Amino acid sequence: MKRDDSKVRYSCLNIDKIKLMLIYNKGIALDISDLTDRDIDAMKKELKKINNDDNIFDREKIFTSRYYGNSLCIVPSNVCQLQCKYCYSSSGEINSNRYIEINAIKKCIDTVFENAKLYKKLSGTKLNFLFHGGGEPTENWPLFKNVVEYIMQKTTNTGTKVFLKIVTNGIMSEKKAQWISEVFNEIVVSIDGPHYINDKIRVFKNQSGSTNVSIASANIFASNAKLGIHSVVTSLSVGKAKEIIDFFRNSISNINFINFQRCRNTQDGRNEILSLDVTEYMDFINTALQYAPDLIRTSVADITLK
């Protein structure tokens, strides 16, 4: 029988003291915590009558929907070793350089693992943890390692599977890069192309280039983990798509994908030098997709307002 998606489909979920009503095909979660049990029972009867389904509150239906929290993006700080010319925060200098308090991060991690108890019987479910930056997530190494080890310890204690991913500039020692390669499932390194491009954009605070260090880390990462390259397309990249792809292929072993992103105007970046228009970017992407279709990823949506 063909399912009638025109009917509104509901489920209810209790999390601690919060009661949620999940409305699947509307993409809505309603907090019904203030309703009495009598109110909720009456609502359930009406919903069952509308849907002609006595099992609309079945837990399997709840956890095959999108309303459980199984992913967490961790941004430990806005501090970075580099001063990339297009950086929207000028390497954190427009804000006070600071780190997230470790107990605040652990509380978020605990919440995600608590959620796992609700759906752990479903096969193939993993918790996803992404380390990202408005700086460099590994810059404060003790904080970063402490958080990762906390996740791994909870994984051991609960038997819950996790998927660890990080986006990094690769500015670190060989020893640290090796540790990350052995712990993380997917690693994305930010490099914008050959030395004559990357060393003009992604520079240390003394203005020296960072390419050699990032490439060395990328090769270590590739030895154990799935490796991706994140490359910002700037005015320096125009007309050089094939050359940039060849540089990555020749410099780094076992690349799984290259994600190209258009350089956009930012308040504190060097927009007059590095920005490019949509037409230039699309020409670049079209060339890249034709040259290496199995390797290239990109997003062409304009997310500036977001």
Image (tube, rainbow, N blue to C red):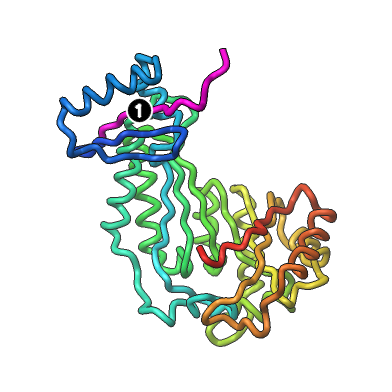
Where is mark 1, residue-wise? 11
Locate residue 302: give its quadrant: bottom right
Q: Residue furthest top?
A: 1
The location of residue 81, given as percent across then percent down, is 50, 76
The location of residue 137, given as percent across then percent down, is 45, 63
Is label 1 in a helix, a strand or a loop?
strand
- Marks counted in the figure total 1
In the image: residue 229, left or right of residue 98 = right
Name the residue rendered at 53%, 19% in the picture.
3
Name the residue rendered at 57%, 62% in the picture.
303
The location of residue 177, given as percent across then percent down, is 54, 60
Three-letter code, disc 1 = Ser
Crowd rating for badge 1 (residues with CA inside 10 Å; few <14, some 14–19, many 20+): many
Depth check: 68 or 209 in front? 68
Quadrant of the snapshot with the N terminus: top right
Residue stretch in magenta:
1-14
Name the residue rendered at 18%, 35% in the picture.
35
In the image: residue 55, left or right of residue 301 = left
- Magenta region, mostly helix, strand or loop? loop
Name the residue rendered at 19%, 28% in the picture.
39
Locate residue 236: give its quadrant: bottom right
The location of residue 66, given as percent across then percent down, is 44, 36
Depth check: 51 or 199 in front? 51
Q: Is residue 302 above or below residue 117?
A: below
Say if the magenta span includes residue 263.
no
Say if the magenta span includes residue 7.
yes
Q: Is residue 204 above or below residue 31?
A: below
